[in-house]
Image: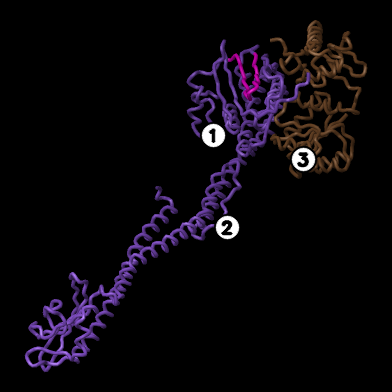
Chain colours: A purple, B brown
Amino acid sequence: MNFRSTFSQIVWLQVLAVGAASLAMPVAIYMFLDRTVSAYQVQMLRNREQVLFHAMRPDAGRGMTLPPGLQAPYAQEISGFAFSVMDGSGHVLLSSEADKGALGPLPVRRGEAVFRRKTGKGTYFGASFPEAMAGRPIWIQVEQNQENPDVVLDDVVAQFLPAAGWLTAALLAFLLMADIVIVRRALKPIVLASRLAGEISPSNMDLRLPSEDMPSEITPLVVAVNQAFDRLEQGFRAQRDLTTDVAHELRTPLSVLRMRVEFLPDAEVRRRLLADIDVMSRLVNQLLSIAELETMVIGPADQADLRQVCLEVVELLAPLAVAQDKALELTGARRGVKVHGQPDLLFQAVRNLVENAIRHSPPQGVVTVEVCEGGVVKVLDRGPGVPQAMKARLFERFWRGRRKERSAVGGGAGLGLSIVARIAEEHGGTVSVEDRPGGGAVFSVTLRPMPTRQPAQIS
Amino acid sequence: MRLLVVEDNADLAELLVPALARQGFAADVMRSAADAEEAVLASHYAAMILDLGLPDEDGLTLLRRLRKTGAQLPVLALTARGSVADRVDGLKAGADDYLVKPFAMEELAARLQALLRRPGELLSESLTVADVSLDLQSRQVLVRGRPEPFSAREIDLLELLMRRAGRVVQKGFVEDHLFGLTAPVGSNAVEVAIHRLRKHLQSLEARATVHTVKGVGYFIAEAKAAP
């Protein structure tokens, strides 16, 4: 049980409170009732005592007598009533009982007192009353058998306890249910808001938590969180816009530089400088790609023809490869290969891999782009290959730190492979590198194939 | 034939004029959208190179307005923005082609040539790659200025490749244009034709070479100077 959840905290504390209340409440009510009933019974006993006291007279000896009219009802045990009259030192002067003894213990001090006793005949509730007869102090004790059918008050109290217990428990259980429903309802908007918060990401930054329906205690938190998101979004956008702007701003001076270099008379110097400018231009493009990637969202219905994408990349880069005395070829699937994804992003990924392969190919080297039916594209080269130690970290994201380590190992493998990895990841795919038998490297991007309907065969 | 260059960066504009002149284009430079609009309405330009990031107005806005007033001239948009969305916007606004900075002068020249050769425009032009040129009117091939005998099929093929010099022409496209429906299925007629043309150019020691991109198609480009 997770007690950090407000809901379970509330429910458990409620359960404890309900348990305690359903015990305490009947007991409290019982005690109150019992006291009331006792007082009532004492009052009844006093009334009878008064009747006795006013009726009895001293007899000839040291005893007392009752008028005959009163003797009969008290003699009958059936009423469950008994009395005893004693002098100050406890000698019985008159009694309804045959054994002529005290009914209960006499109080030590003079004053009204109650007593209870249990005998084979029943449970008795009695009281001792101090009186004075002809200047002598006497005690009059009266008692009532509680088990006599005429006495119902104590039965009512006794039966009340279990009934009240059950009733209280049921009522409180109902309240508990109501509480659970109320708390659940109150927490529902919070659950929804947290689900929504889970969807907020750089490519989905305009989402905010709803403050309608939110319990008013939580609203300030929601507002504060939303404001925090606003500030983050601002900072993030500012950074991305800076990247984009810088990249764009660099392009015009690069054009100027390129033009000036194209006018240089020395062919060798010109060639080298143009190569440098190409490197810089590529970096600028990659910076833009990264900025763009952060905002791209791939819809679940987006699909691309992997073969078409590769065809376009090869078309674009083949003349460049040839200009460097290298070659580029497309092999594998002869028909379209439908994959889940965004064509422009996949184009960038394949382009980066092919550019990388061309760069690392020796003169006259052939770079092969192979499209496989299952949604895999392989780029094979005859370059120096990738050292074992570098393979694992080749695709690490440079923009998530570790740049220093990276450049130490990677030696300028550049942003290209990070972009490839990021694009593959966005597509729910993977990228890997292996040694190519006979020398060189094989870079594979595995994508999720689109479920294809079998095309009608035309013979 | 004059071109209008609309570019606010003084250095780039200053460099573009002689670079275009080298490729055989005379060009006027305008530095703002307002000046450019005036120039287009006042005189007849063969084409416009339009930088989209102008100081007084967005190049696309100017282009949209020009198209609305009926300006027909081909427009090559030049931009520092290069995302897919930007490209689509540019073409929607009425640009005929799109070049992202920084660009190679050769590329710019090739795109301009392609624009100027659109249907109805300057059909009498000739195509040139390195020291090989093809007169489209007389269908005569000149290597280093000397007429050389090429078969009709070779000339068709050469035209196809030279129209997109430096860019890959897909095999299927060559097949359709050269043989149409007459090509027997599964034949290697295109390979044979390409092979012949390549050998022919080599035998003439031409500096234009036909390259094969396996699995995709072919392209013609200037051969690198021998080291």
Residue that numbered label 3 is attached to: B59
* Residue on which disc 2 sits: A212
Give the numbered dot on residue A399. Answer: 1
The answer to which of A72 and A264 lies nearer the viewer is A72
Q: What whole-number distance in Å separates the C-alpha atoms at marks 1 and 2?
A: 38 Å
Amino acid type assigned to the residue bearing label 3 in the image: Gly
The answer to the question of whether label 1 and label 2 lie on touching residues, with beta carbons closer than 8 A, is: no
> For the residues tagged 3 and 1, is the chain the same?
no
Screen quadrant of the N terminus of chain B: top right
Residue under the image location 75 percent in, 22 percent down: A457
Check residue B47 for magenta coloring: no
Image position, residue A278 (x, y; %)? 66, 25
**Residue A381 bears which disc, if any?**
none
Q: In which image quadrant can residue B140 be found?
A: top right
Chain ID of residue with mark 3: B
Observer-nearest of A387 and A63? A63
Span of residues in magenta? A366-383
Element assignment for label 2:
loop
Quadrant of residue B188 within the rendered picture: top right
Q: Tell me if A454 is positioned left or right of A392 in this view.
A: right
Left or right placement of residue A143 versus residue B169 in this view: left
Pick the front one: A210 or A382: A210
Left of B207 or right of it: where is A163?
Answer: left
Same-subunit check for callouts 1 and 2 = yes
Residue at the spot 73% in from the left edge and 25% down from the top edge: A455
Relative to A136, residue B73 above or below: above
Hey, what amino acid is under mark 1? Trp
